[in-house]
Image (cartoon, rainbow, N blue to C red):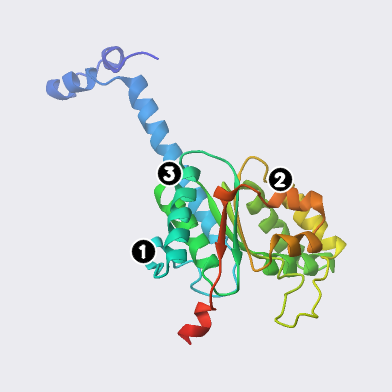
């Protein structure tokens, strides 16, 4: 690429003020082009990131309006969980790829803290982030299997496959919930459910995922086959946050 000085000379720009020409001659067109290409790439990534985030699927309005500053850490466990979640967030931002699991009783803060992780990544990087309610995902997949409104499920699958970070919320409740009644058995997920989740989990290799679930690892192994479990869950202690305690949502009502 010729320099701007040569370009102005070849164009014989006599009508341009001398001072403006002198300033123009100092411009490095290669650097100018590189800088503008970088800016365009930044705008593209930002638009892609925003579109992905807005494509999140959830059951309750306001679920994404959570940040670390909103998480009330009053007990020793809550403080430890908050610290662990911040470490997980930093590792994601630093480029590490892994699966994290937030597990424990209903209403104990799993979803809120997973959203805090996602929002921090979303607001401080160009990484595309997506929140997916697993029960809602499977509702859409069942509608698709029934032969209607398949585009909605297909588009969600594409977003899941392409996102840098996916929060899978309420894993296993799309299939069965464990009730206080000790005689209640955990039902295995249907073949269709397992096929869909396996296909999506397999497409997420080398990317970041955070799963929230009310079920224990033993229960999850009863619900899903081992191939699916191996693609979704982790055994590394640093990637697992255990929640306990009373349902905070009930306490607030």
The disc label shown at residue 189, or none: none
Q: Earlier in the sequence, mark 3 or mark 1?
A: 3
Mark 1, residue position: 69
In terms of secondary structure, where does tag 3 sit? Answer: helix
Instruction: Tell whether label 1 touches label 3 (CB within 8 Å).
Output: no
Q: Residues within 10 Å of mark 1 (few under 14, many from 20)?
A: few
In terms of secondary structure, where does tag 1 sit? Answer: helix
The disc label shown at residue 203, or none: 2
In terms of secondary structure, where does tag 2 sit? Answer: loop
The disc label shown at residue 43, or none: 3
Which of the two discs, 2 and 1, sits closer to the camera? 1
- Residue sitting at x 41%, y 53%: 123
Q: Earlier in the sequence, mark 3 or mark 2?
A: 3
Give the spatial CA distance, label 3 vs label 1.
Answer: 28 Å
Q: Residues within 10 Å of mark 2 (few under 14, many from 20)?
A: some
Q: Residue 238: x and y, percent? A: 55, 48
């Amino acid at each position: 690429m010729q320099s701007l000085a040569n370009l102005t000379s070849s164009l014989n720009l006599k009508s341009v003020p001398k001072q403006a020409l002198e300033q123009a001659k100092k411009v490095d067109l290669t650097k100018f082009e590189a800088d503008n290409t970088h800016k365009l790439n930044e705008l593209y990534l930002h638009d892609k990131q925003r579109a992905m985030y807005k494509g999140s699927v959830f059951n309750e309005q306001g679920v994404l309006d959570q940040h670390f500053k909103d998480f009330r850490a009053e007990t020793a466990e809550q403080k430890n969980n908050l610290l662990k979640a911040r470490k997980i967030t930093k590792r994601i931002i630093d480029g590490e790829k892994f699966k994290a699991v937030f597990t424990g009783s209903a209403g104990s803060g799993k979803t809120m803290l997973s959203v805090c992780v996602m929002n921090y990544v979303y607001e401080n990087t160009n990484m595309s982030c997506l929140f997916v309610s697993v029960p809602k995902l499977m509702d859409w997949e069942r509608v698709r299997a029934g032969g209607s409104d398949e585009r909605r499920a297909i588009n969600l699958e594409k977003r899941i496959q392409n996102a840098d970070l996916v929060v899978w919320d309420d894993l296993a409740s799309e299939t069965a919930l464990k009730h206080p009644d000790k005689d209640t058995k955990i039902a295995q997920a249907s073949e269709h459910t397992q096929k869909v989740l396996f296909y999506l989990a397999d497409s997420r290799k080398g990317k970041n995922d955070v799963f929230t679930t009310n079920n224990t690892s033993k229960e999850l192994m009863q619900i899903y086959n081992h191939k699916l479990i191996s693609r979704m869950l982790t055994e590394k202690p640093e990637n697992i946050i255990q929640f306990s305690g009373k349902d905070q949502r009930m306490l607030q009502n």
